[in-house]
Each structure stands twice: as C-alpha cells, then as structure tokens.
Amino acid sequence: MADSVTITDNRSGQSIEIPIVDGAVDSGAWSKLLPGLWLHDPGLSTTAECDSAITFIDGDAGILEYRGYPIEQLAEHSTYLEVAYLLLNGELPTPQQYSSWVDDVTHHTFIHENMRKRFLEGFHYDAHPMGMFVSALAALSTFYPEAKAIFDPEVRYRQIVRLIAKVPTLAAAAHRFSVGMPFIYPDNGLSFPENFLSMMWKIAEPRFEADPVLARAIDVLFILHADHEQNCSTTTMRTVGSSHADPYVAVAAAAAALYGPRHGGANEAVLKMLHSIGSIEQVPDFVAGVKGGNGRLQGFGHRVYRNYDPRAKIVRQLAYDVFEVTGKNPLLDIALKLEEVALADEYFISRKLYPNIDFYTGLIYEAMGFPIDMFTVLFAIPRTSGWLSHYCEMLDKDTKITRPRQVYNGSPRRDYQPLGERS
C-alpha cells in the first residue's frame, strides 16, 4: 500500500502493514501485533482520541474551519447563534430554521428562582465568578432530571437549548454577585450579545442600550471561541460524556478544565505581562530577558499553530473597532511594540512563535469594562456550543467509554506489614 506504514517487532521478526487514513493509523492493528505494549504519549499530543467532523485546524498553514467554513468568513458575516447552530447540526440554518432556533434560545434564558436565591446567593461574597459558574452548571442537572435521557432527541435538544441560553445568564449573575450588584433578568427583546451586556451592565435604566459596535464585538469573540477541536476542555467533555453523564455535569466538567490557568487563563497572563512591562521603552529589555530565560512571552505561540493564529488577525482589527468606542487601552501601544519586536527577531521566528488570540482578547475585554476574573467565564459562554457539539457527535457514534492505558513505574509486588512492624 502506498499510504501505509510497516511496523516490525524486532523480538519476533513479525511485521504488519497499517494503512494511513485521514492522516492517522489504526491503533487496533498495532495492538494485534504488539498486545500489551502501549504507546506512551503524555498529554495525548500525538494521539487522535476520536474522529470528528466539527472543526478542522491546519496549524502549519494557520487555518481554522467550522464544518468546512473558514473562520474569517464566519466572523465577518455570521452571528454566534448561527455558528452554534452550524456546529451542532453540520449545516448553516435556513431562514426558518434560524428564526426558530433564535426563538428557542431567547425564551430559555431565565434561570429558576431557587438557583438564583438559594444557590448563587449562598456563595461567599468574594467567590470567584468562574467557581460560581462551574458549580451552577453542575447544579442545573438537579433542576432538569429528565436530562439523563441522553438518547431521546427531543430531551437532548431541550438541554442543548437551555445550556446555550442560560450560560450568559449564569455568567452575568456570577459577576454581579461578586461585585455586590443586584441580579438582572434577561430581556427577550434583545439579541444574544445585547442581552448578555444588559445583564452585565444595566443599573436603573428602563432598558439597557448596548453600543452596536461592542455588541458586535462580543458576537465575533463568541464566534472565534465557539470551538477549537480537541483541546483540554473539549477532551474532558468527551471523556465525561463517554460515561453517559448528562450534558449539564459534562459541561461543568469541561468548564472546570477551562478554569485552569494553562487553558482558559492565557489572556489574563498577557495583561499581567503588559502591565509588568509598563512602557514601550521597556519592551526591548523585556524581550532580551525572555531570550535569556527570564520570563515568558505570553500570548505568543500555540499548541497547534505553527503560524499566525487566524483568530488573532481578526481580533487585532476588532480591537481597533472597540477602542473607537471605549477609548484606546493604554496597554495597546506596548502590545503592538512587543509584537513588532518579536516578529522581527530570528529567535522567535525560528521557534514559530506568533501572536495567538489571547494576545488581544484581554485588551478588548478590559477596555469594555470586564474584570480579569470574568475572562475565563467569557471564554466558557461560547465554548458551551462547541462542547455540546462534541458531546452529541460522541453519543451519535456510540463512542466507547474513555479508558486510556498507563505505563506503570511504581513498586514491584510486596507484602503487607502490620503497623507495629514497620520502621
């Protein structure tokens, strides 16, 4: 076979030829030749845990596509709710389908009063919004026990709609509680991004009027964050979902993975870095320090991209649109100088370290008034649709329960010693 690899067991001389299909080889063939011998792959960085038709990434070429549609086209022409429909259903909706979908989501944004009064208000006054958000997602499972009927199409659809509709409400509620502000009910007369901004920022006005530029910016950022293939949180979603857990606890688990600073906290790290640099004049010294092993260039490089992150190009322009409304974030000049210096330095070029999406999103969120504690929550709102898309795909393919192997390197067999005989 032309597109194949041949593996030989040098202990026995036996060989097996394995075809290459869609850039991967079947591990089942490997195990037939080498039973009990596992591939040691910490971080699963060279292991395809599943096959998926949702998101395509070519990291070397800087390409990102949802269901075959380039991210650049979706960010320019689409809306977040349309993209969520695309991710979940595989095709862009017709006008009738879109209208019905938006209506369903719009009319499921409210949360149960007990969730607000007895659950969210039970947190300590300085609870982190993301901790409240993760906990509230899991708690939703107790409000909708029918969600455990995961193979009933109508039941599953209702939970998908509820989750996508309610995550902005929970996110805004967590923020307002953390800063001592009263809860704001959803406004069904507003669009998805406008409603979120209303629940975040409304004070006493009869209706919150979001600036259309800022509402569109939120919508675009939600599109860019909706899915990103098999990252840590999506793999967590599939792992938990493979046990046939209901979608609420599975999304809560995925959000918990996102909570970790290595995953969802990257834009926060960028802001801290820019604050620490302090001024444009300090950029060359900072870059020299990074090259010397002192510090890290946050917001550059990516686990899968070896080229300019296609989302970063979109967000870079989006930042200018936002700053026209909010005023320029003073850190922008430092960021631009840092980008200029790094992209002209062979040290970073040879390592293929280009700006990623996180390099600019924190600047935008800060300019719009979001506190740093909310950055990961803002990531989780749109990623919910991506997580649910993978959850449904996994269930529809009747994926086995996730059960990876390990390489054991602990103590050999030994006998138990009574407590009094141990030294």
Image: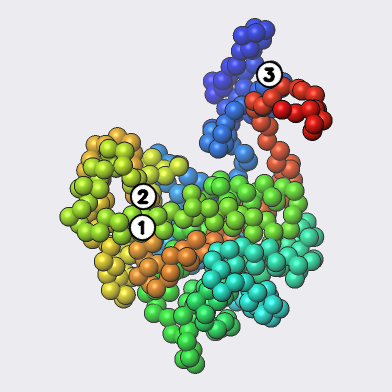
* Residue 272 numbered tag: 1
Distance from label 2 to label 1 (Cα)?
9 Å
In the image, is 298 to the left or to the right of 138? left
* Residue assigned mark 2: 298
Q: Secondary structure at mark 2?
A: loop
Q: Residue at x 32, y 75 (%)?
A: 326
Residue 56 coordinates in the image, percent (x, y): 51, 46
Q: Secondary structure at mark 1?
A: helix
N-terminal of the two: label 2 or label 1?
A: 1
* Residue 34 numbered tag: 3
On screen, residue 201 above or below 223 = below
Dividing the picture into quadrants, the one containing residue 58 is top left
Callout 3 amino acid: Leu
Choose mark 3 or mark 2, whichever is in front.
Answer: 2
Callout 2 amino acid: Gln
Residue 389 coordinates in the image, percent (x, y): 62, 55
Distance from label 3 to label 2 (Cα)?
42 Å
2 and 1 marks in contact (CB < 8 Å): yes
